[in-house]
Structure formats: C-alpha cells, structure tokens
Image: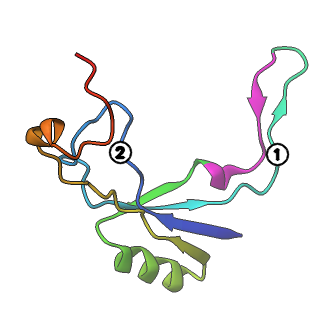
Amino acid sequence: MVARIFRPAKSAMQSGRGGRGADWVLEFAPQSRREADPLMGWTSSNDTRRQVRLTFASKDEAVAYATREGIAFEIQEPKERGVAPKAYADNFRFDRIGRWTH
C-alpha cells in the first residue's frame, strides 16, 4: 500500500498566503473502488485506510513516520506560486502593447 506525502493547497476561498500553515499530510492511496449500495444509493468501500489522514509539522517528520512504520510512500512537492510585480503606473506606459479603452 502506497501513501503520498504532500502539502495541501490553499482553499479557493482564500486570497492570501497567511494561515495556510506548514502542515504536511500523509494519505493512503485507495486499494478498492467505491461501490453504490443498490437500495439506498450510498457509496461505500471496504478500504478503511482511505479514512486515515495524518498531519505533520514538517516533511521530515512525515518521512520519518512512514519509514519507521514500514509504509511505502511518495512525496509530492508543492508548486510555489510566482507573483509578478505590478505597478499602477504600468497602465499608462508609452510602450504599452494594448489599446487604452477608456
């Protein structure tokens, strides 16, 4: 059973980077597919490790836990957001590519 260690992305409802925390998560890959109950329509699975979600303060702690417990894992590094510096004065530059619309 393979687990993945990753840092979750911020919610779509957040605009800044504050409060995201430095938590790393260890989740197990699903072993069996979910099935719909024919009577009620609820989805269920016999894979109980799908419910386990462990959080760690750093990537090193998560890796140490996985190696200590003998869990095969893969690490997904987070993609850092690149912010291009912008200035309001760039809207009025002489060599502006787009036309001024108003």
Whether the magenta-drawn stretch holds residue 49 is answered as yes
Residue furthest to the front:
94
User: Residue visible at 47% across and 64% down?
Assistant: 6
Instruction: State which region is magenta.
Output: 41-50
Which of the two residues, 84 or 49, is positioned nearer the viewer here? 84
Which of the two residues, 7 or 45, is positioned nearer the viewer here? 7
Asked if 15 appears above or below 36 in the picture, the reply is below
Residue furthest to the left:
89
Distance from the alpha carbon under mark 1 to that under mark 2: 27 Å
**How has the structure been colored for display?**
rainbow
Q: In which quarter of the image is the N terminus?
A: bottom right
- Horizontal arrangement in the rendering, residue 48 relative to residue 9 (left or right): right
Within 10 angstroms of label 2, few (less than 14), some, or many (20 or more) residues?
some
Marks 1/2 in contact by CB < 8 Å: the verdict is no
Asked if 68 appears above or below 99 in the picture, the reply is below
x and y, in percent, of residue 66 in the image: 51, 78
Disc on res. 33: 1
Residue 82 occupies which quadrant of the picture? bottom left
Whether the magenta-drawn stretch holds residue 14 is answered as no
User: Residue visible at 50% across and 54% down?
Assistant: 53
User: Residue visible at 25% across and 42% down?
Assistant: 96
x and y, in percent, of residue 48 in the image: 68, 50
> Which residue type carries mark 1?
Arg
Asked if 50 appears above or below 65 in the picture, the reply is above
Disc on res. 10: 2
Residue 65 occupies which quadrant of the picture? bottom left
